[in-house]
Amino acid sequence: MARKLTPAEDVLLEATRDEAFVATFWKRVARSEDCWTWTGGKSGPYGQLQYRRQRLLAHRFSWTLSARQACPVGHVIRHRCDNPPCVRPDHLELGSIAQNVRDTYDRRRRTTGNPNLGTTRPNAVLNDELVAILRRRARGGQSIRSIANGLELEYTTVLRAIRGIGWPHVSEPPVPSSRKGKPHRGNFVRNNPDVVNQACRLRDQGLSLQQIADRLGITKTAAFRCCRTQTKEAS
Ligand SMILES: [Zn+2]
């Protein structure tokens, strides 16, 4: 089945067909018995190079070159050797994003001894690319619950990323709730300090709970809770 490639993947494939470029690529690789290390530019821990002004990750380029295909959507190129600058083709493998998220948890457990760190700091599990994927799936109509389950992520982590609580710099825009006029309930309000503040401001202006609820698209109970929360924190 044919699918649309992102511009970056297009350039990546094109670069693998450019023999002169491929030759320069290998000149910047230091081979050893074990890993083949990229000696050129870096992007974080990963090797990076440029082709026609587009930045490519060195290990992705190497994988694409040997696989003769673009990395399928929803997948990442993983290092079997756990060595980011390595570009040796048989050290690279195609993995699902879910697998990569699991790896992140495992690595954190190994390095910090705290397996729960990933759940208390949910943003650390995601990255820009993954946030964009989550938002695209939500826009395509997939439920947050099913996206979260499919990738083995926490529901709230996925919800926040999709709704745009955090991750303001990701080019894929957040997906607003499509509750079709149904007012938001307590959970939404608790996760949105802005709503709480607005509710209190309206309360101070003398609006009734029902008026606040209508104005902010929340239930009357949620509006009541907002004002109560604020009073508690102030006292
Ligand atoms: Zn390696």
Image: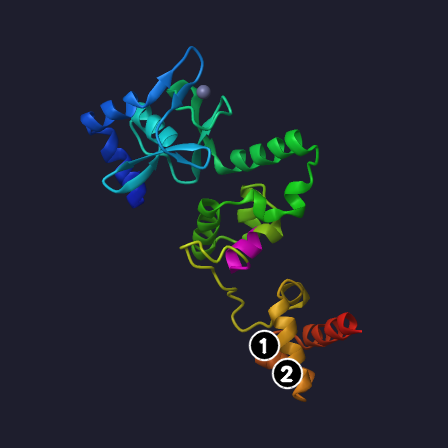
State the residue lying farthest toward the top: 33
The tag earlier along the polypeptide, 2 or 1, is: 2
- Comparing 111 with 186, the one in front is 111
Look at 27% across and 40% down and name the residue there.
Answer: 10
Look at 20% across and 29% down and name the residue there.
Answer: 18
Can residue 13 be seen at all in this image of the molecule?
yes
Circles 2, 1 touching at the beta carbon (< 8 Å): yes
Q: Quadrant of residue 9?
A: top left
- Comparing 4 with 122, the one in front is 122
> Is 56 above or below relative to 220?
above
Secondary structure, mark 2, is helix
> Which label sits on residue 145?
none
Badge 1: few (under 14), some or many (20 or more) residues near its Cα, within 10 Å? some
Q: Please name the residue that numbered disc 2 is placed on.
A: 202
> Is 90 above or below relative to 181?
above
State the residue lying farthest toward the bottom: 206
Dominant SS in magenta: helix
Write down which quadrant ligand 1 falls in. Answer: top left
Q: Amino acid at mark 2?
A: Leu
Residue 28 painted magenta? no
> Is 38 above or below relative to 155?
above
Q: Position of residue 119 (x, y in %)?
A: 66, 45
Look at 44% across and 54% down and name the residue there.
Answer: 170
- Comparing 164 with 158, the one in front is 164
Q: How is the image coloured?
A: rainbow
C-alpha separation, residue under disc 2 versus residue under disc 1: 10 Å
Q: Amino acid at mark 1?
A: Leu
Instruction: Tell me the quarter of the image containing the C terminus.
Output: bottom right
Q: Please name the residue that numbered disc 1 is placed on.
A: 216
